[in-house]
Image: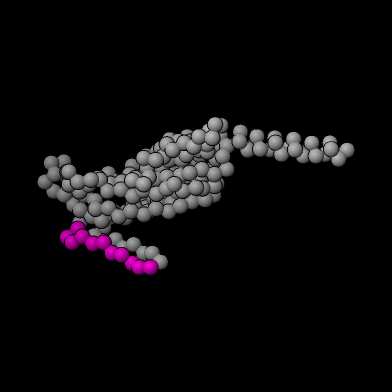
Amino acid sequence: MMMKGIVSMLTLAALGGCAAIIGGPTEVTVSSLMTAPALFQGQIDPFSASGPNTLKVGDSYNQLAIFNLRSCNDDKTDCKVGKGKLQSKTTVLGLSRDEATVRVDLHLDVGGSQTVHDKVSNTGYQLHDVPLKDQVVTSKTIRLNYNASRHIGLPYGVSFNVCVEGTADPAGNVMHACQPLRGFD
């Protein structure tokens, strides 16, 4: 009787393990990239990369970038410049076998100056004679296949890209499809 109970427990444990694999991963790696166009032709586009961030359902991470932004008329005879601060919060809402559901909250603040606060100091960024001002707040819930990325476009050429890597394949090979979003690591 004792042997039958042990076999039953082992069978349940094995089936439970299979169900976890079939049902999807319990954690994923999320990476993101914030970009903006360079102010002038020939300059390198500024970017801010985050990741790899290992997250479970309910976990999130924040990212911040400061950009110089420009808005011009069609013939580029009149341009306005501003300092843009893009803040994001990316939250994993759900994981299935083939995809992740994530919410991306974005706040783009454009003005003559921006301040970044952290635990150690406050850093200010300022432009003089800056008429460009704007506020953009958006939240998107997206379903994203593993090892694929999604682009969210914002005004002034600012963009947010997010990628979710699934777990290793059955052979144990770890996918690194999000590597391009991590910048130069």
**Of 172 and 118, which appears nearest the observer?**
172
Return the x and y of residue 57 as percentages of the image width and height.
55, 46
Residue located farthest toward the right when viewing the structure as drawn: 1
* Residue 61 drawn at (x, y percent): 46, 52
Query: Residue 134: x and y, percent?
Result: 28, 53
Q: Residue at x 86, y 40 (%)?
A: 2
Q: Position of residue 93 (x, y in %)?
A: 52, 45
Over which residues does the magenta segment extend? Answer: 120-130
In the image, taking residue 168 as reference, residue 7 lies left or right, namely right
* Residue 120 appears left or right of 8: left
Snapshot quadrant of residue 180: top left
Q: Is residue 99 magenta?
A: no
Task: Examine the structure image and report whether residue 123 is included in the region drawn in magenta.
Answer: yes
> As rendered, which of 176 and 132 lies closer to the eye?
176
Please indicate, yes or no, whether residue 107 appears anywhere in the rendered image: yes
- 144 or 26: nearer the eye? 26
Front-lying residue, 12 or 170: 170
